[in-house]
Amino acid sequence: MENFYLMDLINAVNGSFVIGNPHLPINEIGIDTRTIKQDSLFFAIKGKSLDGHDYIREAIEKKVSAIVYSRDDINFENLFPTLPSLVKVKDTSIALEQLAKAYRKRFNLLHSVAITGSNGKTTTKEMLASIFRQKGKTLSNQGNFNNRIGVPLTVFNLTSDTEYAAFEIGTSEFGEIKVLTDIIAPHCGIITNIGSSHLEFFKTPENVLKEKRTLIDGIDDDGFIVLNNENTYLKSIIPQTTKKVITFGLYNGSDVYAKNIKLWLDKPVFDMYIDGEKETIELPIKGKFNIFNALGAAAVAYGLGFSFQEIKDGLATCTPPKMRMQAYTLANGAVVVNDAYNANPTSMQVSINSLSQSYPNRDVILVLGDMLELGENSADYHAQLGKYINSLPNIKAVYLFGDLVNYLKSELTDKKSKFFISKTILCEELIQDITGNSLIFIKGSRGMKLDEIYNEVITVDKIKRGIK
């Protein structure tokens, strides 16, 4: 973060200066007293389960230089005389967004990209950031920093020498994409796909599309939007879009497309076509759906003027995000794949099918958890997934953990399946069932924490090998 002064903050958020030094330089912002550094500015954010105002004393003990707060019941007299500078606002979360928007305006030459969609956002972001690094200093949001807290905190990491920024933006309610787009002011954007995600709030994929497409309105007039040409929902809005559109898909008919796809190799290999040119691409991450992600990232980079060689090099050196098709080979030759970061009906079917195709001669063991935030039709979505799994020939067994997966299990009439209420017992039985020809695929919504199963299987394997 580049220096700005407390008075700049007060003006940006329409705050009230309470006490301290209005000319105080600010070079770092934090919201978590567990990690905040001395001389940082502390935003007391009120979340769903925690309220930063309850940790103001701890922030002061950490010797922060300033605090932004909103509650009227904070007794600062008990904290005197060690008070830092204080700024009071109506809503600290909105103030954080306002400050990030003002800070972003300092960087007029920044190439800013917004990435959203029902699936593939994070991997597409990582691929795009890897391509960007072929040319210059690049910023991208880390982990799950894709919401109205994470995106502003990411923006504060911009510096004058940052040339490119890849911002993943998510949503769980109407209007969130517009807020985030206004903050990052993107020159271009990409919608990876529209599917069955966050239906607990949005109810239908059509409503998801309505929310996601607000990204298009927030793009510069001279910018462009990248759309998945094989997604029915996105394809339908291309004729209605007044901004420049670059399309991507698996086959000819899109601006950026793939041919000669080879999935049965350890790494997907395919020919990518851009503007009449062809390059053979090898991805460092498994799954046919990651070819889609690579095509989308390539389409954005192509629109920004990157060479085909830069795109190819960036994709080849991309580091896959954790818990997204993260693979480990056991001592006996079995392969364990961890894709437990998130799950919805679309991503479940696509990833299971992709792994089944990639390893046609393996005995596939699925370890599945609940798909959360699907709303009133959640039971039906789980049942439909069970029917789909029944149709795949090389699924040997299905291990289930959660509550909603019971609806899935009821449809697994042709597969060996077992429901568990304990991850420990699940791991014990799973490890006994693994052979050298097994492919174990672990996937569920993040709240199910199925990565714990992946970690346990690897830990046991390392103990057997004598690895610490």
Image (tube, rainbow, N blue to C red):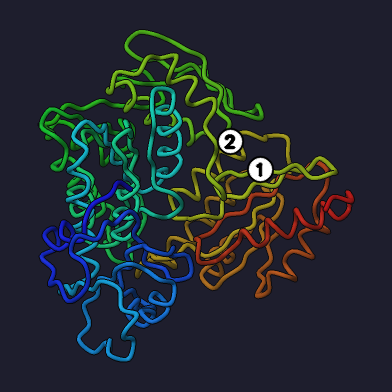
Determine the secondary structure under disc 2: loop
Locate residue 86: give its quadrant. bottom left
Name the spot of residue 249 as percent of width and height, x first.
37, 27
Left or right of 45, for residue 433: right
Q: The residue under label 1 is which amino acid type?
A: Ala
Name the spot of residue 229 as percent of width and height, x first.
30, 30
The label shown at residue 162 is none
User: Which residue occupies the foreground of this view, 231 or 425?
Assistant: 425
Q: Is residue 339 above or below residue 92?
A: above
Q: Is residue 405 above or below residue 389?
A: below
User: Which residue occupies the foreground of this view, 137 or 416?
Assistant: 137
Q: Is residue 378 above or below residue 414?
A: below
Residue that numbered label 2 is attached to: 286
Residue, x 40% and y 14% (percent of image)?
A: 308
Name the spot of residue 443 as percent of width and height, x first.
57, 55
Residue, x 62% and y 33% (percent of image)?
A: 358
Residue that numbered label 1 is attached to: 327
Left or right of 23, for residue 229: right
User: Which residue occupies the foreground of this view, 422 or 218?
Assistant: 218
Q: Earlier in the sequence, mark 2 or mark 1?
A: 2
Q: The residue under label 2 is which amino acid type?
A: Lys
Contact flag, marks 2 and 1 (Cβ < 8 Å): yes
Label tally: 2
